[in-house]
Amino acid sequence: MKNHPSKPRRPVLAALAGLAVLAFAALAAAKPGEPYEKLRVLTKVFQVVSDAYVEPIAFDELVNNAIRGILEHLDPHSSYITKEEFSAFQESTSGAFGGLGMEVTMRDGQLTVIAPIEDSPAAEAGILSDDVIVSVDGKPTRDLRLDEAVKLLKGAPGTKVVVDVLRAGWEAPRPFTLTREIIHTKSVRQKMLTPGYGYLRVSVFQEETSKQLEKAIEDLSKEAKGTLSGAVLDLRQNPGGLLDQAVSVADLFLDSGIIVSTRGRNPAQAAQYAASPNKKKYDFPLAVLIDGGSASASEIVAGALQDLGRAVVVGEPSFGKGSVQTIIKIDDGSALRLTTALYYTPSGRSIQAEGIVPDVRVSGEIVTAQAAAAETRRREADLRDHIEVNRTAGAASQTADWWASDAQLARATEFLRTYVRWERSRVGGGK
């Protein structure tokens, strides 16, 4: 059993003594049925546990546990953050932090992966969205608090951890051995899909993401020798991140309109984030890719671009993480992560537990299987002694091979190219 100090620290006692005076004053004035009457029960529980539990427990530990108890039954995203955890949280938004590289949540008492972060140990090991982490180094995770489960996953860089994972379709959990490391995330990547059409991948929203995306667009435009004919913004498996960066990313493609609004019980939580006119016009046709691992900030971007008619959204419904957590610092260096509001898209839709529904729904697994079947069909090129033609565009077609097997990306790309051809024919521009 864990040993606990038998006497609480003096500063804690002094602070609690002051609180006790106020609490007992409130209790003395409380009438039956008033909320303050319940404080009498809480005070009694503190006293009984402190005096009668089989092992002595420091009073400050009792207080911390009471705080956690208040928060853990509100919703999966409200929690108490210790001083050490708060320091780690601040590091996680700067682009370098320790861990396995996956966003997790508690769903029906099970530790569930929202999305692995690109190029992280979790992603490289094959961890997927919706995987359930049954145990960590043999310790079951069911019904743990989220902060307790996250603490099991964290550790010193270079240390190994075994997670038992249960996935839909598996009869039993399978072990994954991961090595913890400092996670260096590059939030933006770009590549040319086919001449004139760019691919923009945002894996997480962190500091400088919008600036990195702007540079990626400029680099692709130079490669296209002018303006892009269209682009795909890939937000799949993007677990979210910083709200201000989500707003800035959406604003790159918008000149006006409300990007996202927040509303809570407290009027102070009501806010609107509006687009502003851009010096550079990125008005090329845009498709946004989402899936079940797209959460929070990525849903804000997809929802804004969809509602304001700026992009077509392709893929599968997003995760549905539409609540706003406010970090409230406490004097001792700890903090509360408290859900204080909900996000709403420009049309007034709540993202919470609903997510963003794509305009064009494409299941990667099903369509990929169809594409694989199509590849087995015999074509002219498969016939013996067929005529070969020397095409100068052959090199260009080969560069598209990297995305052809991605059913959702292929559908988005084809949609853009069809749209551009239609627009050009509509205005008499020809092919």
Image (tube, rainbow, N blue to C red):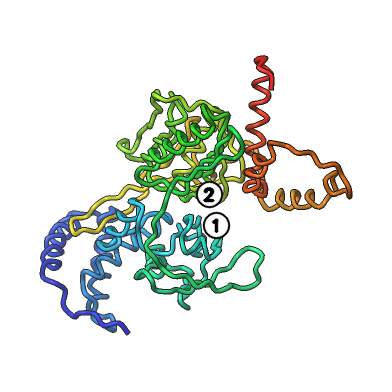
Q: Which residue is mark 2?
A: 319
Compared to 254, does 36 lie above or below? below
Q: Using the image as rendered, state which of residue 90 and residue 410 is in the foreground.
A: 410
Outermost right residue: 384
SS at circle 2: loop
SS at circle 1: loop
Name which residue lies at 31% across and 55% down: 91
When asked about the image quadrant of residue 252, the answer is top left
Name which residue lies at 12% across and 60% down: 18
- Does the residue at mark 1 contact the one at mark 2 (Cβ under 8 Å)? yes
> What type is the residue that disc 2 sits on?
Phe
Compared to 43, does 339 lie above or below? above
Left or right placement of residue 374 versus residue 293 in this view: right
Left or right placement of residue 406 versus residue 179 in this view: right
Local crowd size for mark 1, using a 10 Å CA cut-off: few (<14), some (14–19), many (≥20): many
Residue 104 visible in rendering: no
Q: Which residue is mark 1?
A: 129
Left or right placement of residue 61 versus residue 359 in this view: left
Q: Using the image as rendered, state which of residue 375 and residue 79 is in the foreground.
A: 375
